[in-house]
Image: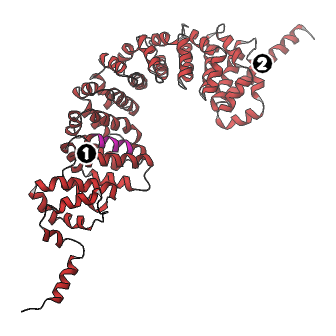
Amino acid sequence: MSQRQIIQVFEQYQKSRMQFVQTVADLASRQQNIEILQNAGVMSLLRPLMLDVVPGVQQTAALALGRLADHSDDLAEAVVKEDILPHLVHSLASQNRSYKKAAAFVLRAVAKHSPQLAQSVVACGGVDALVLCLEEFDPGVKEAAAWALGYIARHNASLSQSVVDAGAVPLLVLCLLEPEMALKRIAASTLSDICKHTPELAQTVVESGAIAHLAQMILSPDAKLKRQVFSALSQISKHSVSLAEMVIEAEIFPAAMVCLRDQDEYVKKNISTLMREVVKHTPELSQVIVNCGGMAAVIDYLGNCHGNLRLPGIMMLGYVAAHSENLAMAVILSKGVPQLSLCLSEETEHHIKAATVWSIGQIGRHTPEHAKAVATANLLPKLLQLYMDAGSSEDLQAKSKKALKSILQKCTYLPGLEPLLYDAPSNILKHVVCQFSKVLPHDSKARRLFVTSGGLKKVQEIEAEPGSVLQEHINAINSCFPEEIVRYYSPGYSEVLLERLENYQPA
């Protein structure tokens, strides 16, 4: 065989290898091919090609592996079992930028599925190698590395700590300053994933100067970046008063309020989540948000969205109202109660209804004036209905019961209470009757209305245990009226009158 023929054989071999890995990479991009490729044992065929002398074959083999691993945890497990990760990690330091991006993609695809698979990436030195990639000049390599680190960090505090310990945070903060929008997004997302687990991890991110850089991007024209920025600020704020104060001190409010009118629904959801995480800590932090128009902005937002997008705004109102009478009144004056009533009637998911009920309870539990605002919105019968509905989730029933009791104990607005006389079970009824027994002795107009509306008649029909708290309240109500009126509305009194009529002998 001549030298030329030998060269042709080698060229053909190289061409075949490249054609094979390219074909596998293309096939792996479509879900319907995955199982066939897996059954054909493609993983063990790709492994030696990761060590190929031709860089193009190596990186295309890595791309194919990444696409396979991305599809399922079974295939990601197979990548780990084939012992491919150590080679990938080792190669990250020496190969070209295209290979580094492909290798980082494989590490991300493996790590995303579970903490155990992410731990496999950590165990083979993957985090240190990815952090080194953050120092590369090429923004595409940085982006791929940051993305993989985010998938590792998001699982739990331990994995997040391994990313921090490898020195990733200062480099991720520097990535926020890069001109490439995609890199900014991924850096903000990864910082969010790191600091969501514990106050200590969030503190590490804050100490690297992240808040100031994130705050500068809140009005970026790029919606996807704003999503990640508000997510990261939320994850920082949620842990403690001091961290929330640091976010406030970055002066992102009231400028950020404009984002509640953003075109992107997730930008709006994330800014309302940030506001929720800030206000939940203290009355002072709530007051800051109220003072810069946050309350009205969130209530307006609730009127323009549905489903889970409403949830953080609903809870934000509840947290504000929970702190004090004045803050709860601020929610009422901003027309928060009618908006929550609308949410309660429009939403079908029980967890959203439960959050709405909780917020209504926080508003109405302070004083008779607060309770009246809830009662005049006709919310008490709705709360009772949700509590008594066998189809309501356990959490929704529990929250409805608690909200109802806390509002009833303050409510002196009798027209709002009266409908409950007809439907409430005894454990709720005793609170309703108690409020009547408190108000009626001091209000003659209320006593008259109570008779004409049928309330007194209904009270006489209640079957209460002798000596019970409920019976004591009924007795207190009856003592507010002349004995003959109470007798007139008592069950069986008409029969007594008819009997007297039968026995009556005219003179």
Q: Which residue is mark 2?
A: 48
Residue 38 locus on image (x, y percent): 74, 33
Residue 106 in sight in this render: no
- Kindly tell me whether residue 412 is visible in this rendering: yes
Marker disc for residue 7: none
Q: Secondary structure at mark 1?
A: helix
**157 versus 314 height, above or below:** above
Residue 100 falls left or right of residue 291: right
The magenta-colored residue range is 354-362
Q: Which residue position is annotated with label 1?
A: 338
Can you say whether 251 is above or below 309 in the image?
above
Q: Is residue 435 magenta?
A: no
* Residue 489 on image: x %, y %: 19, 71
Tell me what residue is drawn at x 46 percent, y 24 percent: 196
In the rendered image, the quadrant that contains the C terminus is: bottom left
- Looking at this view, is 63 or 174 the one in front? 174
Who is closer to the viewer here, 282 or 254? 282
